[in-house]
Amino acid sequence: MSLPFGKICRKIQWEMMINAYINKNIMELSSERIMLYEENGTREIMSYSTSSADDCCLYDTEGKKHAIEGISEIHSSFLKMISLSDENKRNYPVLTELKQYLIDSDSFELLSPEKMRLSSRGFADSIGNAGEKLPSFIKSMNEKQKQDFNHNIKAVFGDHLAAVDAKTKGTPGWTQIISTERYLKKSMPIESKNMSDGVLRLLAFLAVIEINKKCITMLFDEIENGINLNYAEKLIEVLKKSCIKKGNQFIVTTHSTTFMDYVDKEEIIYLYRDPENGFTRAAALFDNPVFGRKLECFYPGEVFMNMSNEEIVTTLLKNREG
Amino acid sequence: MKEKRILLYGEGKTDYGTKNYGKITREESVYTEQEWLPGPIVHFIKKCAVKSGQDISIEYAEKECIDGKRRIKLGKKQMDELKRQGMTQGKALPARRFKIFALEKGFQFGIFYCDTDKIEKGKNTDKQACRKEFERIYREVDVGLDGAGSNMWKGLPMIALKMIECWLLSDENAYKLCFGSTPRAPVLPRKPELIWGSKGDKNSDYPKNYMDRILCQYQKESGLEIFNEIAEKTEADVLKDKCDISFQKFYIDIQKFLED
């Protein structure tokens, strides 16, 4: 995979073997390897194996091997065991940058309008996994962030929704989101407790763009949930602009053919279950010539609308065999 | 010149034809000439092709695949594009589906036939109003056949003002050749595109009713076979002069369409 961590985009190969002990309800790392692709070839920068004499090896910038002994069971990636000390940053810059990138990257797959609707307290530098800190995050935005946030809200909602901000009541104070809905003859303030699920989710997506991090990856699950599809085009446009501006990457899952229509074909990966063995497979769908040709007259989502899952999977499997 | 393979779509049996149930063994989406009983517009297209010196072969799109249960589904983005051009009603949608269907089936050329049918009440015999309506529907179909996509595609609207019967009521010599004499009672209309009347009144100038009365003189009835006979004997130049709004437009367009 190619990842935008550090100052430049790097290509790494990351292999991991995990043993699952169902009766004990635990998983154990059996082996792990990270290879870095460089101009003059690939080199290993980390390896771990329970079956090797040197349990774990890190390779420094000169390619020198440093074995780390005495590691007992590991239930996750070995990368977790590497501290972000200055010494490690000096000796293993790629590994530490990779770890920092993974720590900074955020997953918002549990966004809950119910939690976003509630007040939150204090300040926050993110919206929280479920969006529970959205009001606090909006409150924490500086002038520039708020300006950009409201600019994007206008881009998506038009003039209908304006002046989205956070308001704190009481001491020590609970913060709510406040917006103004504008109609021809009337404007009305709306508090987050009265906002619809779709509006809250959209505000969450637009707020996430203002998180003060660059060159990270953010994950959204089923972006279309609760969202009026008339906002799909503008939302994707805003997310794309943010990617270019901040070097961030959004990984978004969707079943919505409407959302797919607004994404470039190179950006679409299709996940499916192999009918023979149930393995989950991934395919860059439009690299397949059959689907690529369909883009002559269909937008990406329309290809899905006009084919069944079975037809798509059969075509992909045929291509793999070929 | 290389033969051009054209996909044709129409409104129904009496214009573009119907499946030849004796020759087909299963439901298809595209039918060859052997599997299809062509309608009168096929004769008109072939006459124009002869004039242009271009060899063509025609295949036929199954109606279900354009306007029925098996029709292509269009997504929001494509619909929004049509909406931006003011074209979400009328013929733009089926024309767009036809274009996509044709490209999917590997065709680079397609002809989409439809009628204008009636104009606004009270204006059905007004030439200017008829021309305006014809141009409106032509634009709808043209937008539908165009849109984003392959540079290798050429789609052509073929629109009868007001229905196929009007075109078939153009050349009196065709009737002489088919039935032995030119129509007398009634005679063919001077301006077939501008006739109109009440559908329910058999004596009105509603084109289908007019056609029925013409054919009655020869003890014939309207139908695919008769329409084909008349179309086959109709001269394209005569049709072009008598139907100088709709057929003339098609006649000029198809010459460019068939050019390499």
Image: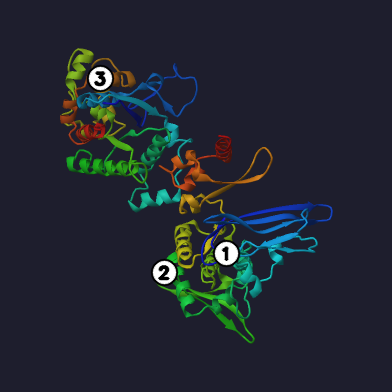
* Residues behind callouts 3 and 2 on a single chain: no
Mark positioned earlier in the residue sequence (2 or 1): 2
Q: Amino acid at mark 3?
A: Glu
Disc 2 sits on a residue from what chain? A
Return the residue nearer the eye: A128 or A243.
A243
Cα distance, mark 3 to mark 1? 64 Å
For this orientation, the residue located farthest to the top is: B180
Where, quadrant-wise, is the N terminus of chain B in this rendering? top left
Q: Amino acid at mark 1?
A: Asp
Q: Amino acid at mark 2?
A: Asp
Relative to A269, B248 lies left or right: left
Q: x, y percentage for residue A5?
A: 56, 64
Residue that mark 2 sits on: A159
Assess whether mark 2 and mark 3 are in contact (beta carbons under 8 angstroms).
Answer: no
Query: Could you tell me which secondary element the residue under label 1 belongs to?
Result: helix
Residue that mark 1 sits on: A197
Q: x, y percentage for residue A221?
A: 59, 58
Disc 1 sits on a residue from what chain? A
Residue that mark 3 sits on: B232
In the rendered image, the vertical position of residue B26 relative to residue A322, given as above or below: above
Query: Could you tell me which secondary element the residue under label 2 belongs to?
Result: helix
Cα distance, mark 2 to mark 1? 19 Å
Relative to B159, A85 lies left or right: right
Return the residue nearer the eye: B54 or A212.
A212
